[in-house]
Amino acid sequence: MYDNDADRRIDISEPVMSRNDRFAAENRKFLTDRNIYTLNLISSPGAGKTTVLEVMARFFGPGMAVIEGDVQTRRDAERIERAGCRAWQIETGGACHLDAQAVGNALEHMEMEDGTVRLLAIENVGNLICPSGYFLGEDMRIGLLSIPEGDDKVLKYPSLFSTVDVLLINKMDLVPHLDFDVDRVVEECRSLNPDVTVFTVSARTGEGMEEFCGFVESNIS
Amino acid sequence: MAKDMTRIIGRTLGRKVNLERVNVTVGPLSGISPESLRFCFTEIARMEGFGEPELVITTTEARMVCLECGHEYSASDFYQCCPVCGSISRRILSGRELTVDSVEIEDSAE
């Protein structure tokens, strides 16, 4: 029994995300110790994350490795391997995002000790909401938005687009066929996030991809 | 997140005990829906052996600084413009937090 309310009340004052943040910090240390620059690629399903990574795999070759996050199947990892990079598939088995602990487990298995890998791309589970809250230890967070999704998505998903370093607008080859105001998207993203860098690309035709890959390369020390 | 909350509580208390109340602070930019959190947490707290505590959610204000005029202001969502100059161009200073503040143990728990 307690004498008064004060005895029954116990202060905790701990951020709920602190556990994920600890794992993320470990990932960050693991990767920087090995001179590996890390991307976290976030978009809705079908925006073209894997196709962008296939083009990047051809640009960077074996110097790039990929962690694929999907609810189920190794399909995306197989696509990346065919494009010439090593890939590790995380099947979340239902979870709608990757967390730092799952990425840490993957890093332990990826055999990146020989020094050839200098860029790691993490493809998150297709989702514009949950992945935004989980820092994985990345150096650069990329939000990918594709033309068929519509030009109103940035302000609908502010928790993501306010935290991205790069906004990559994909499927630019479809602009002539759809009503998508690229300027509106860029302006709305900058209002949430004044420091964002924007690239407009088509992974399918290759338009803009060299500039984007060159930008990523310029960030690798 | 609800599971992480019970993990934090369990680690701090060092034991499983029926709780009367759990106090948390939620920032308006955290993406947390209070109703969803309450639903999940109530269920998980029971499953994890913490009884049926009431989840008391305090919502804070976000802090923003306007990049046009430099005014610092409070906001309750992502869309509030600067009250001085009306610009939407701003840097977010805080508002994404989700914190377990404290727990209150049930009177008859021990």
Image (cartoon, grey):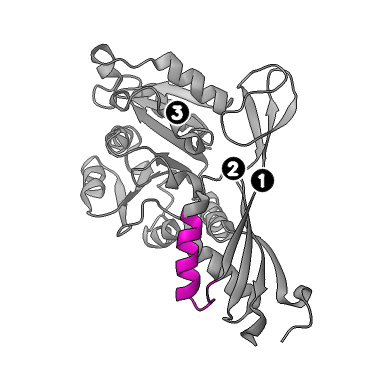
Spatial separation of the CA atoms under disc 2 and disc 1: 7 Å
Residue B39 is one of the magenta-drawn residues: yes
Q: Marks 3 and 2: same chain?
A: no
Do tag 2 and tag 1 residues touch (Cβ < 8 Å)? Answer: yes
Identified by mark 1, the residue type is Thr
Please name the residue that numbered disc 2 is placed on. B28
Q: Is residue A49 visible?
A: yes
| Left or right of residue A20, residue A89 in this image | left
Residue at image position (57%, 41%) is B29
Please name the residue that numbered disc 1 is placed on. B60
Q: Mark 3 lies on which chain?
A: A
Q: Position of residue A195 (x, y in %)?
A: 58, 26
Spatial separation of the CA atoms under disc 3 and disc 2: 18 Å
Which residue is more in the foreground, A95 or B29? B29
Identified by mark 2, the residue type is Pro
| Left or right of residue A97, residue A172 in this image | left
Marker disc for residue A154 = 3
Residue at image position (45%, 41%) is A39
Spatial separation of the CA atoms under disc 1 and disc 3: 24 Å
The residues colored magenta run B36-52
Do tag 3 and tag 2 residues touch (Cβ < 8 Å)? Answer: no
Question: How would you rate the neighbour count of disc 2 (Cα within 10 Å): few for under 14, some for 14-19, many for 20 or more?
Answer: many
Q: Where is residue A189 in the image (x, y as percent from the top left)?
A: 50, 25
